[in-house]
Image (spheres, helix red, strand yellow):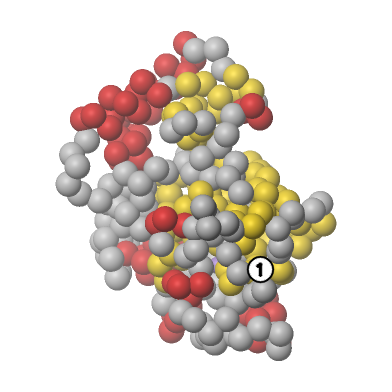
Amino acid sequence: MRLCRYDDDRLGVVVGDKVHDVTDAQTEIRAAAPYAGWADAVIAALPQWRSRLEDMAGRTLGKPVSSVKLLSPVARPSKLVAAPVNYKKHIEEMKRRTDVVVNNTASIGDAGMFLKANSSLIGPSATIPVRFPERTTEHEAEIVLIIGKQGSDITRAAALDHIAGYCVGLDMTVRGSEDRSFRKSMDGYSVVGPWLVTPDEIGDPDQLPIRLEVNGVEKQNSNTRDLIFDIRQLIVFASSFYTLYPGDVLFTGTPEGVGRIKAGDVIRVMSDPIGEMSVNVGAHTAEG
Ligand code: MN
């Protein structure tokens, strides 16, 4: 199943090139969800609601997905967890850089993971507002996991059971000497989309392609088979430090080919079994 959020906070099931409105289910799920606790209500409810959502979708007339405004597939994650330096060739390219400050290329086991502000999360139809045009802002295409089941100290054998779905994402980054969490957390610097694809449509998560183009020119092209910490290990690692909750967003790291973007650019991120998203880059304004 492909689940999206769109327009004015509506919930949809994507079938082919159509989105089917299941917002009534979202309203019911949210109304029944406890306010206390960290889980995103809709993601937490998916195991119980999935077949009903598919039934509802089958009874509604879809509209072209190209005609809607796609939001982040998760409304309220408790956290955005991200893997730094998780592709060998990306570490090598960053070690070679002399044009920007590169302050941490330690292996992921030593560097750990980092958190991005939840308020940096946007969907593909929003524009990335470049906050510091005088500094180097770069694209990082990544496969993104959405956690579906609460867990702490998750084992490798159980890791995939904790995934609600897969997305593609952009971990937008200002290069510089500040802590990663500071320079990767500006409004709009975490793009996730185009929708959540459930694991049954994915196949082997260790064979997922990830590609990125800027203005039609390919810049990044890799596959999760080249990850240093693979998807299972990332879940083990993250959950050894904190409980993962339904709706938590996990960026798996970017491969080689990162590069500078500027207002006016169009970034396209794609992964064959997931889908693709096209995201516009603009300028930050005081009004947001
Ligand atoms: Mn990244």
User: Residue 224 sits in which quadrant?
Assistant: bottom right
* Residue drawn where x is 28% and y is 29% of the image: 29
* Residue drawn where x is 49% and y is 58% of the image: 187
Q: Is residue 41 visible?
A: yes
Q: Within 10 Å of the Cα at label 1, are there few (<14), some (14-19), or many (20+) other Cα atoms? A: some
In screen coordinates, is 90 left or right of 154? right
Q: Is residue 15 visible?
A: no
Q: Position of residue 56 (x, y in %)?
A: 42, 16
Q: Which residue is nearer to you in this view: 60 or 278? A: 278
Q: Position of residue 204 (x, y in %)?
A: 55, 50
Q: Position of residue 44 (x, y in %)?
A: 30, 40
186 relative to 102, above or below = above
* Residue drawn where x is 51% and y is 33% of the image: 6
Q: Looking at numbered disc 1 in the image, what kind of residue is underneath it?
A: Pro
**Mark 1 sits on what residue?**
133
User: Residue 156 sits in which quadrant?
Assistant: bottom left
* Residue drawn where x is 36% and y is 58% of the image: 79
Q: Which residue is nearer to you in this view: 172 or 186? A: 186
42 relative to 181, above or below = above
Q: Secondary structure at mark 1?
A: loop
242 relative to 169, above or below = below
**Where on the image, by quarter, is ligand 1?**
bottom right
User: Residue 88 sits in which quadrant?
Assistant: bottom right
